[in-house]
Amino acid sequence: MLWLKALHIVFVVTWFAGLFYLPRIFVYHAMTDSAEVRATFKIMERKLMIMTHLGGSLAWLFGVAVLVQVPEWLGQGWMQVKLGLVLVLTAYHFWCRRIVIELAQGNIRHDHVWFRWFNEFPVIILLAVVLLVVVKPF
């Protein structure tokens, strides 16, 4: 059980690293007019998206494995809220994927200010999830 929890935490950290850094690259991508620099950002975004997919998938896998070991957590309010936030984070992840595809096609629909705000969303989710898991307020 402790191995599953440890691996879950490692891959949650990996997932969040991608979700923190990827939108930051979007900011820089939106700020430049250089085709050469944009080409570099496209490569970085694509490679980071792969790492983020891997981290997210393994975080989900080991999280589900922990819940299989301790199914009674599913009946607890803190876990239900946490799982809701994980679903929201997963939607954010796939929104990032869509943005990577759009930027790769040269379609920049938002300015750097919008991306700066977009970049803050996973911070809020991380704070809420950590507080729920540690404090278990419900």
Image (tube, rainbow, N blue to C red):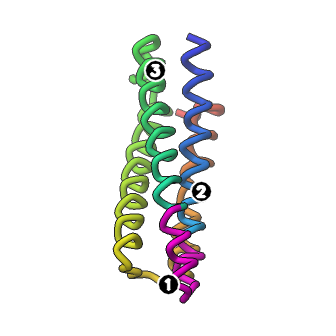
Secondary structure at badge 3 equals helix
- Classify 114 as above or below 49: below
Please give the name of the residue rendered at 57% of the width and 68% of the height, measured from the top-left corner: 25
- Whether the magenta-drawn stretch holds residue 34 is answered as yes
Secondary structure at badge 1 equals loop
Q: Image check: 79 left or right of 135?
A: left
How far is mark 3 from mark 2, CA to CA? 28 Å
Q: Which residues are magenta?
A: 26-43
- Classify 40 as above or below 30: above
Query: Residue tagged by mark 2?
Result: 20
Which label lies toward us, 3 or 1?
1
- Tell me which secondary structure the magenta stretch mostly adopts: helix
Q: Which mark is residue 15?
A: none
Could you say which quadrant of the image residue 105 lies in? bottom left
Q: Amino acid at mark 3?
A: Trp
Q: Which mark is residue 73?
A: 3
- Classify 66 as above or below 128: above
Please give the name of the residue rendered at 57% of the width and 47% of the height, measured from the top-left corner: 16
Please give the name of the residue rendered at 54% of the width and 69% of the height, measured from the top-left corner: 41
> Tag 2: Cα neighbours inside 10 Å, few (<14), some, or many (≥20)?
some
Q: Which mark is residue 111?
A: 1
Q: Amino acid at mark 1?
A: Asp
